[in-house]
Amino acid sequence: NAGVMQNPRHLVRRRGQEARLRCSPMKGHSHVYWYRQLPEEGLKFMVYLQKENIIDESGMPKERFSAEFPKEGPSILRIQQVVRGDSAAYFCASSSLGGENTEAFFGQGTRLTVV
Amino acid sequence: GIQVEQSPPDLILQEGANSTLRCNFSDSVNNLQWFHQNPWGQLINLFYIPSGTKQNGRLSATTVATERYSLLYISSSQTTDSGVYFCAVYYGGRRALTFGSGTRLQVQP
């Protein structure tokens, strides 16, 4: 029973390029959350999605960042025209029910380095 | 928004020692999770505990929601316990976790 799968584990991009981060939730989970962790800090919420719907994007930067969770396939976090400040670990979590009703499980994260 | 404060921020222990990590939150919460982030960065679920006490091996957790705190106990610590321990809460109508800043634990042999 695979857990939350994220890929790639490590991603290096030059300033101005695009970064695409993928997340496959646990089997049976239809709720996906993205968090960002800057060095030596806790995780900060970015966006919450269900299949084909963005439920809460209050933590997403207004520009360059977007997320989707299509009917088929993984959830994608897309960062356009990356800058050095985007360097961080990006974690995806999934749950079977939304919100506080069930436990959230995290993937291993994608570590993005912008050079 | 809610403030989630963890203490101590850093802790160094000798192998075999016991410790208590604390998580205080400034408002009522609907649920709470404890995580261990190991030195490789992986987040491992420890407890899902809105109230009461739970135990899992050498670890146990207690949440007293009415007094707005949770405690994580680690007994007979091992070097593999090293890493950062986070508490995270659900509050209000938010459907995502709000994390504390973590307690960094180093267990020395």
Image (cartoon, coloured by chain):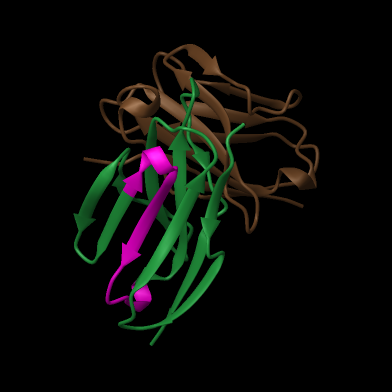
Q: Position of residue B42 (x, y in %)?
A: 43, 55
Q: Quadrant of the C terminus of chain B?
A: bottom left
Q: Quadrant of the N terminus of chain B?
A: top right
Residue located farthest toward the bottom when viewing the structure as drawn: B109
Q: Position of residue A46 (x, y in %)?
A: 59, 31
The reply, left or right, for residue A4 in relation to residue B100 is left
Q: Is residue A105 visible?
A: no
The reply, left or right, for residue B44 in relation to residue A60 is left
Q: Quick one: B73 or A62, which is closer to the camera? A: B73
Q: Which chain is brown?
A: A
- Say whether residue B49 is magenta: no
Magenta segment, which residues?
B63-80
Q: Quick one: A98 or A68, which is closer to the camera? A: A98
The reply, left or right, for residue A82 in relation to residue B108 is right
Asked which quadrant contains residue B80, the reply is bottom left
Q: Position of residue A79 (x, y in %)?
A: 68, 32
Does residue B60 sit above or below A104 in this rendering? below
Q: How many marks?
A: 0
The residue positioned 62% from the left and 53% from the top of the image is A41
The residue positioned 42% from the left and 71% from the top of the image is B82
Q: Colour of chain B?
A: green
Asked which quadrant contains residue B29, the reply is top left
